[in-house]
Image (cartoon, grey):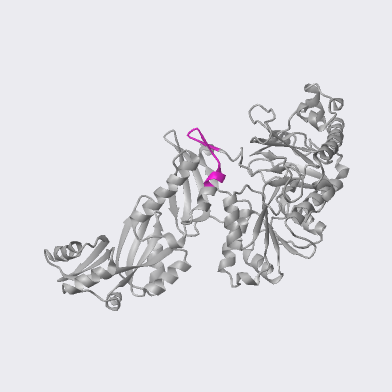
Amino acid sequence: MQIKQLSVFLENKGGRLNDVANILGEAGINMSAFSLAESSDFGILRVIVSDPVKAQAILKENKFAVSLTDVICVHVPNSPGSLAKILNIITDNGISIDYMYAFAECADANVIIKPDKTEDCIDILQKNKIALIAADELYKI
Amino acid sequence: MIWNETIECMSRKEMEKLQSIRLKQVVDKVYYNCEPYRKRMQEAGITPNNIRSIHDISKLPFTSKKDLRDYYPFGLLSSPMSEIVRVHASSGTTGKPIVVGYTRKDLDVWKEVGARCFTAYGLGKNDVIQVSYGYGLFTGGLGAHGAVETIGGTVVPASSGNTDKQIMLMHDLGVKGLACTPSYALYLAEALEKSEYKREEFQLKVGVFGAEPWTDEMRRELESKLGIKAYDIYGLTEVIGPGVGHECEFQNGTHLCEDHFFPEIINPETGEPVKKGEIGELVFTTLTKEGMPLVRFRTRDLTSLNYEPCACGRTSVRMGRILGRSDDMLIIRGVNVFPSQVESVICEMEELEPHYFIEVDRINNMDTLEIQVEVNENFYSDEISKMLDLKKRIAHKLQSVLGIQPDIRLMEPRSIERSQGKAKRVNDKRKLQ
């Protein structure tokens, strides 16, 4: 249930995000979700792509600092209180969330979560019958 | 191995005798053949008769870099142009360079001292040595070239640049010694790692690095990256070029060829000699040069001298690491900062690549110091907080060494410019305002 997220270090200068998007686009790699965390002089792009291993290799060739991070993806109804329920389960079990981002479409939403203990988090969510999205499913979106 | 045991292992007393004879000769030569020297000695109330031994040297006036510029190009020659067979020039980035003329005998002296260096690094007639210093006006290329030929080694005159070809030559020709600037060595090390060749297919064992100040931390970095022993070769264009001094197998100070280049250490503010072993500005008098002899030339390099005989058997005086060129020193918010201090911290941290760039500016009448660094691939994190934490640790380490807090800028991999010659690692924007 673990998902490989691409984490790319970017200097805070014009056009770097375009470079990543162009390189991945030309290689035929699709992005299904991403978030950009920023500080004053650098940012970290976190992105779910259709082929993370290939994307990592191509970005490395182009001199980007890029790593793969294990995250999970939770499928929740796009309705009030449904995210709160999941977050309660996670935090009640002593797991912290380093960061998360989400994308919603019509009745459903997908939430990417980076917990501090990935495997424990998957166990607990599965025990609580929370729907998780598998890697191959998500990469295809 | 020692190239010239008679001289390099001479007793202190014998050496001073030899230096005294040669000092009198060189003072005679400049006094009677070079007007600026004669005038300055006359102003100081000194004639060659006042110089009886090497201990009288402090009676003589200094020569500065400015003098060399003022008398550009040939005003400080002490031999007629008919005797000058070659010129070299400093890599001055602003205005006119410093031009130095060599007689045939000067070139012979240069080869002799160069041979002492390469022999001390354990290189000899059976070895292939690649010279990747630039050939041309810069003394590095032709200086190292002459030295290798003198010891009878096989010289590969690769000059600088064209890195892929450099690596191919090193690989195919069984190169044992590599002579270049430490910053180019670092560049070659990275390129070698990415090349099609495996390290064990190379014969490379010795690095002969000089022409820019470098630290012991950089030495360790180069030794582990290239799998070699890295030696310092010291020289100044004004004095002769590479060959003024060299390390030996003990890597415990740079032996100076003091029978040709007499060193003193002075207090840069007062001009007075410092106590034995103390740090100060290095001053050279060329005892045997004919073309452009220098009397008490102030190098602006800060270091100290050690007269203890070395475990290698040489008795020649040893110079400590150059702590900085007073020209390189940055004064930031009133604090003296040397790029070499920054380098020692950067090279020590495993999270960082050994590349850096220093940018100094003045914003709202306040000096700013930004140090750009590249993080090692294994230490990039997907979490902002971890990267900020790393930034903080770098800043803290630098502050404890520099005495002021720098701004750290984390850069993308391989985005700091790699140097193929002398590295330019500082941009002081204040000078432009």
Quarter that holds the N terminus of chain B: bottom right
Q: Is residue B338 magenta?
A: yes
User: In this view of the protein, can residue B85 be seen by the observer?
Assistant: no
What residue is shown at x 79% (from left), y 30% (from top)?
Answer: B55
Measured from the top left, where is residue A28 in percent x and y?
A: 38, 75
Vertical placement of residue B28 versus B156, above or below:
above
Q: Is residue B419 left or right of residue B315?
A: left
Vertical placement of residue B362 versus A19, above or below:
above
Q: Which of B42 and B227 lies nearest the eye of the viewer?
A: B227
Vertical placement of residue B237 versus A90, above or below:
above
Quadrant housing residue A129: bottom left
Q: Which of B273 and A45 lies nearest the eye of the viewer?
A: B273
Measured from the top left, where is residue B173 in percent x and y?
A: 72, 70
Vertical placement of residue B373 versus B282, above or below:
below
Q: Is residue B420 left or right of residue B355?
A: right
Q: Which of B279 and B427 lies nearest the eye of the viewer?
A: B279
Measured from the top left, where is residue A114 in percent x and y?
A: 28, 64
Measured from the top left, where is residue B200 in percent x and y?
A: 63, 71
The residue furthest left is A80
Q: Is residue A114 magenta?
A: no
Quadrant housing residue B168: bottom right
Residue stretch in magenta = B330-342
